[in-house]
Image (cartoon, helix red, strand yellow):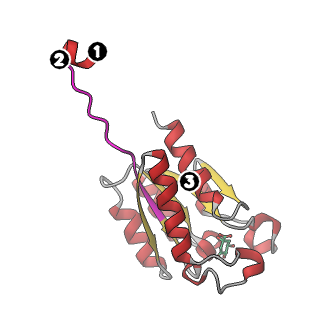
Amino acid sequence: MAAAATGLTWILEAMKILVLNGPNLNMLGVREPAIYGKRTYSDLVGFIQREAGALGVDVCVRQSNCEGELVSWIQSALGEFDAIVINAAAYTHTSVAILDALKAVALRTVEVHLSDPSAREEFRSRSYVSLAAEAVFKGRGFDSYADALRHLAKVEV
Ligand code: DQA
């Protein structure tokens, strides 16, 4: 009403978020269910899409077992997405290449994990992704992804 009266038109574009999942996350449901649960990777994708729909954000969800493919998807996000949510899985603890790609595009980045890596083996306590992330959500299973989407939807300026 107010917009019509002043002749202003507001076009609100949904925030576009790229959700990246790293190696072995395609094995959810089979992989170490005591740690990662019994739900499958396609359950996770459906969960993320439903959460995104409820928040009014657009998501593109991708998974790769290959470090270079993840790097290429991060690079391609520039100009296409507003933010990245990333569970780099084992590459979290090893990949300077993924860290450098995240720093290169300088998009808002949120790190997620199903488990809490810092409460597990010592080698999981280092995260290279954290060096480029504005927030980390971990240890809450699928809900870690919901927390990340809510964080981005809420604090966008
Ligand atoms: C993980 C934790 C990592 O340490 C592990 O290598 C994974 C999954 C998680 O979501 O809890 O593959 O990122």
- Judge from the rendering whether residue 70 lies leftward or rightward of residue 37; answer left or right: left
Residue tagged 2: 7
Sequence-wise, the earlier of marks 3 and 1 is 1
User: Closer to the camera: disc 3 or disc 1?
Assistant: 1
Sequence-wise, the earlier of marks 2 and 3 is 2
Residue 77 part of the magenta segment: no
Q: Give the range drawn in magenta.
A: 7-19
**Disc marking residue 2:** 1
Inspect the image, locate mark 1, and give the three-letter code of the amino acid beneath it. Answer: Ala
| Residue 12 percent location from the top left of the image | 31, 36
| Residue 49 percent location from the top left of the image | 47, 60
**Residue 126 makes an appearance in the image:** yes
Image quadrant where one finds the C terminus: top left
Sequence-wise, the earlier of marks 1 and 2 is 1
CA separation in Å, label 1 and label 2 = 9 Å
Q: Classify 10 Å Cα crowding around label 2: few (below 14), some (14-19), many (20 and above).
A: few
User: Closer to the camera: disc 2 or disc 3?
Assistant: 2
| Residue 28 percent location from the top left of the image | 61, 80
- The quarter of the displayed image where residue 111 is located: bottom right
In contact (CB < 8 Å): disc 3 and disc 1? no
The correct choice, above or below, for 82 with respect to 5 in the image is below
Q: What element carries label 3?
A: strand
CA separation in Å, label 2 and label 3 = 38 Å
Q: What element carries label 1?
A: helix
Q: In this view of the protein, which residue sits in the foreground, 76 or 12? A: 12
Q: Classify 10 Å Cα crowding around label 1: few (below 14), some (14-19), many (20 and above).
A: few
- The quarter of the displayed image where residue 112 is located: bottom right
Inspect the image, locate mark 3, and give the three-letter code of the amino acid beneath it. Answer: Val
Q: Classify 10 Å Cα crowding around label 3: few (below 14), some (14-19), many (20 and above).
A: many
- Magenta stretch: helix, strand or loop mostly: loop
Image quadrant where one finds the N terminus: top left
- Judge from the rendering whether residue 27 lies leftward or rightward of residue 73; answer left or right: right
